[in-house]
Amino acid sequence: TLSVFADVPVGHKLESRLLTACMTDENLPWISPVVHKICLQTVQDPSLIYEYLPDPGLKSFIQASLELLFGKHSPAIVENRAGGVHTIGESGAFRLAAQFFRLWHRDASTVCIVSCQKESHGLVFQDMGFEVCEYCIWDPKKRRMDSNVILKVAEQMPSGCILVIGNPIDCRLTQSQWAKLMSIMKSKQIFPFFDIPCQGLSTGDPEEDAGVLRYFVSSGFEFFCSQFLSRNFGVYDEVVGILVVVARNNEQLLCVLSQLLSYAQALWLNPPSRGSRIITTILCNPTLQEEWNLSLKVAVENMMLIKEKVKEKLRLLGTPGSWNHITEQMGTHGYLGLNYQQVQYLIKKKHIYIPRNGYINFTCINASNIDYITQSISEAVLFTKDS
């Protein structure tokens, strides 16, 4: 049995491959090499005291994370109107934000989530009593990301609502389209909430991956952002996250953070420190950060090579249709472009367990399984009805 991805039928072991951002050729979770180095140093550090962290989390970690997201000389940082709360992963950031919105943004009864796939964040908002509308930017018929989806959603949203944008670089908007979206959001007082799940693993450049947020900062927007830092460093079990707040001024920022901290104390009291210490050590040392940046670039180049190989093997097999969409998608995950019947063929006939929508982690494909997988995809396309 070749169990490659999550969404396994009852009775089979549920893999976590869909959650893991990047896998190696040995089918193990990718870890930035510099992380190994820092882990060894941390274990051998006799001065390390395992005391509880301060209420907002490790201060140097939050500052380093903000600078990674916005740039050291960002107006939001220089003007002291950007801050954050150390959370337990993405879900912790969304839970914290949802509670804040419920109590302090009561006019917003609707949350619209735009992403390249269905996210679990909607359940968090539903649990807090919000009406949730989810939209996918992937067009299965045209096999591409539809940049117009988010503009249409914003135009149709009620005024004063919350718009969650999952990994904004996936939206593929031009600068003029982002400007149009901002204009709509300002006129309708729509509050933006960004999700940055793996900065640097889309393009290989952390600055490029966060470019949209920097554009919103320069345009004077206030917003929330879930910044998840476990995947792009490879410390998955540490679930390191931050709820980032960008406010209009420092006074407003302090008021928001004080409320968020009171909620965080009730939810988890104190976040774990090991992952944040590792990340802080890397981001606060220019040499180590350069090593980390290089490791991201190499990881992205490897995943693009995997996609190129998959596309080329499908072409050589004479698989009907165009497979350019595989290499046009950024990041570790993407759509195979298969319909429901074709996915079912892979699951039932070939024992390749992938999500029903065909959204997979491409880095799970390696030298040992690529021939079997591409041959199976080709058979699924040839032996099933297109619908």
Image (tube, rainbow, N blue to C red):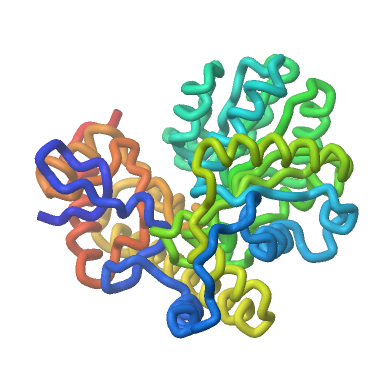
Give percent across and percent down for residue 199.
Answer: 58, 58
Q: Nearer the viewer, residue 155 or 379?
A: 155
The part of the image, by quadrant, that contains residue 188 is top right
The quarter of the picture where the N terminus appears is bottom left
Q: In the shown orientation, is residue 153 left or right of residue 190? A: left
Q: Nearer the viewer, residue 29 or 258?
A: 258
Give percent across and percent down for residue 383.
Answer: 16, 40
Q: How many marks?
A: 0
The answer to whether residue 207 is seen in the rendering is: no
Q: Residue at the location (51% across, 26% down)?
A: 134
Where is 190 relative to 14, above or below?
A: above
The quarter of the picture where the C terminus appears is top left
Q: Residue at the location (65% across, 50% down)?
A: 56
Q: Nearer the viewer, residue 357 or 142?
A: 357
Q: Residue at the location (65% across, 41% down)?
A: 261
Q: Residue at the location (39% across, 58% down)?
A: 237
Q: In the shown orientation, is residue 379 left or right of residue 220? A: left
Give percent across and percent down for residue 54.
Answer: 63, 55
Give percent across and percent down for residue 184.
Answer: 79, 27
Where is 245 relative to 24, above or below?
A: above
The answer to whether residue 361 is seen in the rendering is: yes
